[in-house]
Image (tube, rainbow, N blue to C red):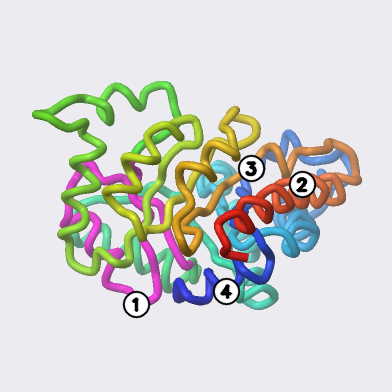
């Protein structure tokens, strides 16, 4: 998907919401657990309920892989459903893949060709030859882990190697890679104080911001520090939306939670004169 199409959806829906599909069969409603494909059925109802309020979906690949072949088949069905019924919505494989070049080429083929995702999250630790194969695809995007919200982020990402923290050097170096215009970046919502610095480094890039909601990140702080003139943000909420209710009304509860975030986002977009 071209970024122009994503920007159009942001303006139409007055939203920069991404809904994370972290499907745990232990947490889905009892009424669904006997369904022949409970994972897909749960995702389908979540998607149908939240599609009016979001511009992206982010299946967390581990939550599908955990169920082996059954989970992978469910993921294929989810992607077929999204690509056929909601082709205007941006899709992100939360897979955090990257390896030596020939392996990354296969990862890219799996997620961009076989599953037809628009983007995939990438770990930068192995450097440019592990990332550039993902950047060869026109209108596809690699979302590079820059500054994450987990406790262990400080183990490496905040290390001062010279005069700059490592995450700053990762961002600086990545801008020189081939087809770097197809890069997006992950910045945790709980690290919103660093967004001003990051925006000076990559003023025009899209940032995927997890951690709003269950992880305690502030949407207001993210919007104030991270929005650029064309939005440039995708803020993800997973558990706060898809598990808003454990009863059979889970899809309506998810819709209400998504709508609440969308309305707040509309306010911040209006402040910036974007939508």
Quarter where residue 247 is shown: top right
3D distance between C-alphas at marks 2 and 4: 21 Å
Q: Are marks 3 and 1 in contact (CB under 8 Å)?
A: no
Label whose residue precedes the other's in the sequence (2 or 3): 3
Q: Measured along the vertical axis of the image, is residue 190 above or below residue 104?
A: above
Q: Which residue is drawn at 46% across and 46% down?
A: 226
Q: Locate residue 266 relative to residue 221 in the image: left or right.
A: right
3D distance between C-alphas at marks 3 and 1: 28 Å
Q: Measured along the vertical axis of the image, is residue 250 above or below residue 191?
A: below
Q: Which residue is drawn at 35% across and 44% down?
A: 145
Question: From which residue to which does the magenta span run?
Answer: 118-146
Report the residue marked by disc 2.
260
3D distance between C-alphas at marks 3 and 4: 23 Å
Q: Does the magenta stretch include residue 142?
A: yes
Q: Residue 238 carries which label?
A: 3
Report the residue marked by disc 4.
8
Q: Residue at x 82, y 48 (%)?
A: 256
Query: Element under label 2?
Result: helix
Label whose residue precedes the other's in the sequence (3 or 1): 1
Q: Which residue is drawn at 12% across and 29% down?
A: 163
Q: Where is residue 220 in the image (x, y as percent from the top left)?
A: 59, 39
Q: Residue 99 carries which label?
A: none
Q: Are marks 2 and 3 in contact (CB under 8 Å)?
A: no
Query: Element under label 1?
Result: loop
* For discs 2 and 3, the disc positioned in front in the rendered view: 2
Report the residue marked by disc 1.
138
């Amino acid at each position: 998907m071209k970024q122009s199409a994503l920007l159009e959806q942001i303006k139409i829906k007055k939203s920069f919401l991404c809904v994370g599909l972290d499907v745990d069969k232990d947490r889905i409603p009892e009424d669904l657990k006997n369904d022949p494909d409970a994972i897909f059925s749960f995702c389908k109802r979540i998607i149908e309920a939240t599609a009016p309020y979001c511009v992206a979906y982010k299946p967390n690949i581990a939550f599908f892989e955990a169920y082996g072949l059954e989970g992978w088949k469910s993921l294929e069905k989810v992607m077929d459903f999204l690509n056929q019924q909601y082709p205007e919505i941006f899709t992100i494989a939360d897979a955090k893949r990257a390896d030596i070049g020939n392996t990354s080429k296969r990862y890219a083929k799996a997620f961009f060709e076989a599953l037809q995702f628009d983007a995939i999250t990438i770990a930068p630790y192995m450097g440019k030859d592990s990332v550039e194969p993902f950047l060869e695809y026109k209108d596809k995007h690699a979302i590079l882990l820059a500054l994450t919200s987990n406790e262990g982020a400080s183990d490496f990402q905040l290390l001062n190697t010279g005069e700059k923290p490592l995450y700053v050097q990762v961002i600086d170096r990545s801008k020189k890679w081939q087809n770097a215009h197809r890069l997006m970046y992950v910045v945790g919502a709980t690290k919103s104080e660093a967004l001003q610095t990051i925006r000076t480094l990559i003023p025009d890039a899209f940032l995927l911001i997890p951690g709003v909601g269950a992880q305690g990140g502030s949407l207001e702080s993210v919007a104030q520090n991270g929005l650029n003139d064309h939005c440039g943000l995708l803020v993800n909420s997973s558990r706060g939306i898809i598990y808003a209710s454990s009863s059979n009304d889970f899809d309506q509860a998810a819709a209400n939670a998504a709508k609440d975030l969308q309305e707040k986002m509309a306010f911040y977009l209006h402040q910036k004169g974007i939508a």
